[in-house]
Image (cartoon, rainbow, N blue to C red):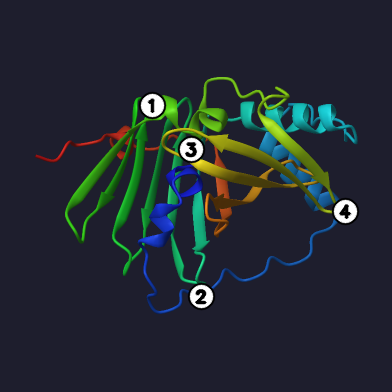
Amino acid sequence: MLAVLLLPEVALRAEVYDPVPLPRPRPAVSASEQASAASATFGQGASRPAPATSEAGVLANISSYFNSFRTMQGEFIQIGPQGQQSEGVFFISRPGKIRFQYKPPVRLDVISDGRSVAIEDKKAKTQELYPYSKTPLRYLLDDRVDLTNRKLVDGVKQEADLISLVIIEKSSLVEGKLTLIFDRQTYELRQWIVTDAQGLDTSVAIFNTRTGIRPDPNLFRIYLQR
């Protein structure tokens, strides 16, 4: 979701630093715990979407998942095409706002204020700006998310525990394939994989996510560098 999701050159800049430990696997959860997690995802008192098997039903349920919250925060770990690893925290405030903060030794911030997307390299003291409306960020961060548009999703694959969908993007800023991976029971976003025009993959897994917490609005401010 994100410039790390949508602008894979961010991953390439990470270089090969000392490996960052992967998050520990989550323990197995019972059916009742899964139901509680789903209830938390879709809000107290909100009805969880009925399980779907058709492509249209799955996309409708995933869209409902995104539209069930306005804010989210959590942690991420990113693995680049050459196996380089980096990690950090992220904050989302829909519509249009997101911030990814990489932990040292990577010194990058990726910020969207709903109008522009900024990639700030603190080490090199550089800043690159992209129009938000020209990036695929808009598909997942807009005021209302609708993935049922047949022109948007190129394919859906359903497995026992996961659902993956593919978005093909061709624009002046981004060209490649975006694979989004969701939990089959809760429809929560778990991971995405960016395949660039050269066929190189960058994957990002998110974990320890929480919704409904209002982030500091200053997190999404872009200060133009002169």
Q: Which residue is mark 2?
A: 21
> Which element type, helix, strand or loop, lies under badge 4?
loop
Q: Amino acid at mark 4?
A: Ala
Q: Earlier in the sequence, mark 3 or mark 2?
A: 2
> Which element type, helix, strand or loop, lies under badge 3?
loop
Quadrant position of residue 205: bottom right
> Which element type, helix, strand or loop, lies under badge 2?
loop
- Quick check: 17 above or below 10? below
Disc 3 to disc 4, C-alpha distance: 31 Å
Q: Earlier in the sequence, mark 1 or mark 2?
A: 2
Callout in the foreground (3, 1)? 1
Q: Amino acid at mark 2?
A: Pro
Q: Which residue is mark 1?
A: 114
Q: Amino acid at mark 3?
A: Ile
- Asked if labels 1 and 3 touch by Cβ distance under 8 angstroms, the answer is no
Q: Earlier in the sequence, mark 3 or mark 4?
A: 4
Q: From where the camera sits, is residue 200 visible? A: yes
- Asked if labels 4 and 2 touch by Cβ distance under 8 angstroms, the answer is no
Crowding at dot 4, Cα within 10 Å, few <14 / some 14-19 / many 20+, comes out as few
Crowding at dot 1, Cα within 10 Å, few <14 / some 14-19 / many 20+, comes out as many
